[in-house]
Amino acid sequence: MPASASPRLDVRRAADRLATKIDWLDSKHSFSFGHHYDPENTHHGLLMVNNDDIIAPGQGFDTHPHQDMEIVTWVLRGSLVHQDSMGNSGVIYPGLAQRMSAGTGIMHSEKNDSWRLAGASGGAHDEPVRLIQMWVLPDEAGVNPGYEQLEIDRELLAGGLVTVASGMERYRDHAAIRINNRGAAMHVARLAPGGPALTLPDAPLLHVFVARGAAELEGVGPLAEGDAVRVSRGGGQRLSVDPAEPTGAEIIVWEMSAQH
């Protein structure tokens, strides 16, 4: 590969993320979000938001509006109840892919209803929910709002990259859910300790986020939970579980073909 095309690996550590912490929410923001604004950190490619949220039991985001955004929610622990103005209502849990297209406008709420769900099941009632919520701009503004979800827990057991959400033509037959952006795809891998490494896709832009556990990336070294690498002109690097991590790692990779 010519020197001019050498990949750029921009490491962003978990502790350096912007943060919002109130009595019911502990949120870490990979990019500018809400009242946190940094003109040098507004997005990476098409990815505008990568929020790492922990929501207390019985709490959450009350009904609020969104417009012209593709929103993907990935739950790591616990369960999140979604309700929106289109009449969609359901529980999002680990291994369930969920996408909401805000389009011309949609209202929704997201709550950790573990206290209510536990009452029906007899389980624990005090479990926080941890989720990663990601926003990508759509190809076109003003599309009809939409909602889609699919359970993919079985596919994740294989250990490789599973295409969770995509608008790319190359993943048309493989993505669990579709987003309205032809230049973006989100993949997830659950890597077992001592298992084989995975190879990052070749793409103009990648955003590699360690959602759980610890990993090692070729050309970077160790990555802790919450760390991210913004890759430009790259791909092909090997990613594996950190040898000192006993429980494995869960990795979210956004593959993007264009800048915002």
Image (cartoon, grey):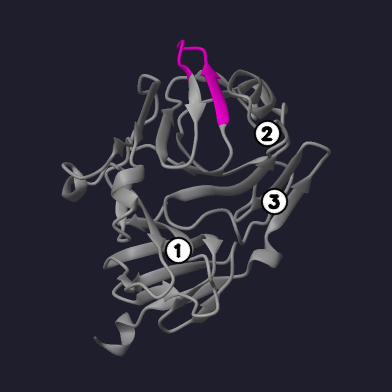
In this rendering, position of residue 125 left or right of residue 252: right
Place residue 113 in its image quadrant: top right
Type of amino acid under label 1 = Val
In the image, what residue type sits under mark 2?
Ala
Closer to the chain start, of discs 3 and 2, is 3
Question: Mark 3 or mark 1, which has the lower sequence index?
Answer: 3
The answer to if 82 sits in the magenta stretch is yes
Instruction: Answer above or below: position of 55 versus 66.
Output: below
Question: Start and end of the magenta stretch?
Answer: 80-89
Report which residue position mark 2 lands on.
124
The answer to whether 213 is drawn above or below residue 237 in the figure is: above
Task: Choose between 187 and 123: the one closer to the eye.
Answer: 123
* Whole-percent x, y for residue 50 in the image: 55, 50
> Element type at marker 3?
loop
The numbered disc on residue 208 is 1
Q: Quadrant of residue 118?
A: top right
Q: Is residue 11 above or below residue 154?
A: below
Residue in the image at 46% along x and 50% along y: 47
Q: Residue furthest bottom?
A: 3
- Mark 1 or mark 2, earlier in chain: 2
Where does the N terminus fall, quadrant-wise?
bottom left
Q: Distance between the residues labelled 3 and 2?
A: 38 Å
Frontmost of labels 3 and 1 is 1
Residue lying at 30% horizontally and 61% vertically, measured from the top left: 160
Give residue 49's position: percent from left, percent from top. Answer: 54, 47
